[in-house]
């Protein structure tokens, strides 16, 4: 192990700690405050472990966990773009690509390329692992919205159609959960009418 390699690795890990300072719109289940992205990353990894049995396809589960651990790191520079932020979505891909260049570029080239590939795989939504990871990434805040009686849905007023569209990866990657998800969404929006 070279001193330069370890120096780059520790610099990256120190930088990754900044994920704790990026706050999302999603409320904690006790509604006391918004969660930070590091908390979200931990919780979706745990969610994936618990819901693994519902995956629609066979998975390389180690790859899923690595992908979930890496996919939000770009928010350190790009910030969290709220799921229903139409204006923010217009610049999200460019902001996140620049962040990926900087952050993964901090690492030794072999590690930087590996983490970058995991991030790109998640964003592309093409592999069974990416389908599952994206579904879990949608399911975790969905549960928080249920626990807070609508949480961010009550605060930011997305439409039923927007929420259903956002949750759609669950329909295909975790189909056994779709009836529960759809019924919960319908119940919430019916109560708002």
Image (cartoon, grey):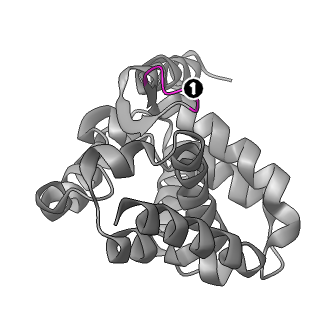
145 left or right of 60 in image: left
**Image quadrant for the C terminus?**
bottom left
Segment colored magenta:
29-33
Whether the magenta-drawn stretch holds residue 30 is answered as yes
Q: Main secondary structure of the magenta part?
A: loop
Q: Secondary structure at mark 1?
A: loop
**Image quadrant for the N terminus?**
top right
Name the residue located 75 percent from the left edge and 42 percent from the top edge: 46
The foreground one among 98 and 72 is 72
Image: 126 above or below 83 = below
67 left or right of 95 in image: right
Image: 2 above or below 116 = above
192 left or right of 40 in image: left
Q: Residues within 10 Å of mark 1 (few under 14, many from 20)?
A: few
The foreground one among 152 and 187 is 187
Residue 125 on image: x %, y %: 51, 75
Q: Which residue is identified by label 1?
A: 30
The foreground one among 70 and 142 is 142
Residue 61 sits in quarter: bottom right
Does the image show residue 128?
no
Name the residue located 54 percent from the left edge and 81 percent from the top edge: 126
Residue 176 sits in quarter: bottom right
Residue 110 on image: x %, y %: 56, 48
């Amino acid at each position: 192990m070279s001193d330069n390699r370890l120096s780059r690795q520790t610099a990256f890990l120190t930088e990754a700690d900044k994920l704790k300072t990026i706050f999302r719109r999603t409320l904690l289940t006790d509604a006391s405050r918004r969660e930070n992205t590091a908390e979200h990353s931990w919780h979706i990894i745990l969610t994936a472990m618990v819901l693994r049995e519902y995956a629609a396809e066979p998975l390389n589960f180690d790859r899923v966990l690595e992908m979930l651990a890496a996919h939000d790191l770009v928010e350190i520079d790009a910030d969290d773009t709220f799921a229903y932020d139409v204006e923010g979505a217009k610049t999200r891909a460019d902001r996140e690509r620049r962040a990926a260049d900087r952050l993964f570029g901090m690492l030794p080239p072999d590690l930087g390329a590996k983490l970058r590939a995991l991030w790109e795989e998640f964003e592309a939504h093409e592999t069974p692992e990416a389908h599952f990871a994206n579904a879990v990434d949608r399911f975790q805040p969905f549960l928080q919205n249920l626990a807070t009686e609508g949480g961010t849905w009550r605060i930011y007023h997305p439409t039923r159609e927007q929420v259903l569209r956002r949750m759609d990866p669950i329909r295909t990657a975790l189909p056994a959960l779709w009836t529960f998800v759809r019924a919960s969404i319908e119940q919430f929006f019916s109560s708002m009418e």
